[in-house]
Image (spheres, helix red, strand yellow):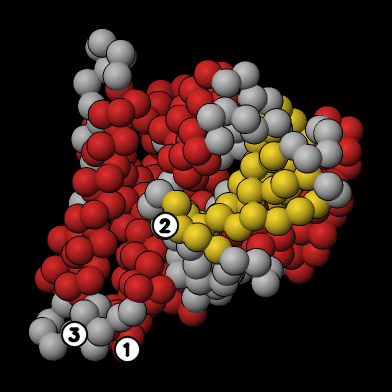
Amino acid sequence: MLNTLILGLPTGENSSMSTIISTMMYLSFILFILFGQKIQLYTMIWNMSGAIKKLEIMKFEARELTIKTLKEIGKPKNDIVPRLNALLEQFLISPVNMDPAGIVWKFDHLLDVREEKFKDDVKRLAPEADNAQLNNMENLVEGSLALNTVYRIVRHFYLLGRKTQSFYLILQLQMILPLIMQEAEALVGATKAFAQGQPIGDGVGALVASKLMKDKEKRKVEKDVVVSELMMDGRKILALKAEGPGGNVGKPGDAIKQLIEEREGKIAMVIMVDAAVKFEGEKTGDISEGIGAAIGGIGTERFKIEEEASKYKIPVHAVIVKESLQDAITPMKKEISEATDNVITRIKSLLQERTQEAETIIIAGIGNTIGIGQ
């Protein structure tokens, strides 16, 4: 079309128009070579500014929900905002790992101290909350803290990249930003679940144990973990989970270690039930079996289980329920809840195939017990 228009012009005008167009094309090419990266950088910065604003709104909403819930349930007499602001920027310094010997117990000690202080701080914010509510409030503040941390880190690299005009710093941040936003949205959903005391997807292991322990006598072992004894297909089962219905994960590693020591290592098998992150394309609620200690976290509890199981040559089996990160920390979906019956069926098959009658087996339901009773 452009050629047709040019050809329709007189010869002088045709030549002048061709020269102008050629000059513009050459100039555009030169500008792109000289300033293309800068243009791309400013475009990325502009796009990322919207994401930063959205993260800030998420952080603000989670903080406001936390303040509202603490006031409604905890009924504090003083202004909690300054203390909460300080709590939302709390951090943990990892122990020195140049000499790794004994680092697990150092981590374990630091986590115990951090948990005790965190719980005391939340108790001061919500003095009228009972123990279950206090655990829920602790999870709620943890969710707000996580969102605040995500926002601060992303904002730091965004501002640093904009300040230094670093194309590659901004590029790297932009590449992982969709995953960060996905995690942030999941954390917002988590804070709402914690505020309302609803079960979350991560509690599927605890829900399985709760079904096994129904109407059975329970006793407390170690920190915030309860255990019941029952019979299943002629086998003696020691079913354990964190104490509910408040948001709690307990210390299952210590509990399993205690149960094994109580029976002098005469445990035929340890079966651990937990949620696990699924691959894209897999269905939420699908079940898989494996070998090893199925438990998340920093690794201290898994280390204890592996040490004790290795000491007495006890096989450790895992049954996991697949779910996304969003499913794990947001209200439990129907597919996950319904998967618990299939998990129990898998456990029975595992017992029949790998154990003998009259043997003792530990079944550990791993996960957050928020909204899940005994």
Element type where label 1 sits in the image? helix
Q: Residue at x 26, y 62 (%)?
A: 119
Q: Residue at x 24, y 48 (%)?
A: 114
User: How far apart are the two marked residues, 2 and 1, measured between alpha carbons?
Assistant: 26 Å
Question: Mark 2 near mark 1, Cβ–Cβ under 8 Å?
Answer: no
Q: Residue at x 40, y 49 (%)?
A: 222
Label 2 packing within 10 angstroms: few (<14), some (14-19), many (20+): some
Q: Label 1 amino acid?
A: Glu
Q: Position of residue 335 (x, y in %)?
A: 79, 63
Q: Label 2 amino acid?
A: Asp
The reply to whether residue 33 is visible in this rendering is yes
Q: Quadrant of residue 357?
A: top right
Relative to 61, does residue 8 appear above or below in the rendering? Answer: above
Residue 359 lies left or right of residue 50; in this view the side is right
Residue topped by disc 2: 224
Q: Residue at x 22, y 71 (%)?
A: 123
Q: Label 3 amino acid?
A: Pro
Residue topped by disc 1: 72
Element type where label 2 sits in the image? loop
Q: Position of residue 61 (x, y in %)?
A: 38, 73
Relative to 158, does residue 75 appear above or below in the rendering? Answer: below
Residue 229 lies left or right of residue 37; in this view the side is right
Q: Quadrant of residue 313?
A: top right
Residue 66 lies left or right of residue 343; in this view the side is left
User: How far apart are the two marked residues, 2 and 3, measured between alpha carbons?
Assistant: 26 Å
The reply to whether residue 365 is visible in this rendering is no
Residue topped by disc 3: 76
The label number, if any, that marks residue 311 in the structure image: none
Image quarter where the C terminus lies is: bottom right
User: How far apart are the two marked residues, 3 and 1, measured between alpha carbons?
Assistant: 9 Å
In the foreground, 218 or 290: 218
Q: Position of residue 333 (x, y in %)?
A: 71, 66
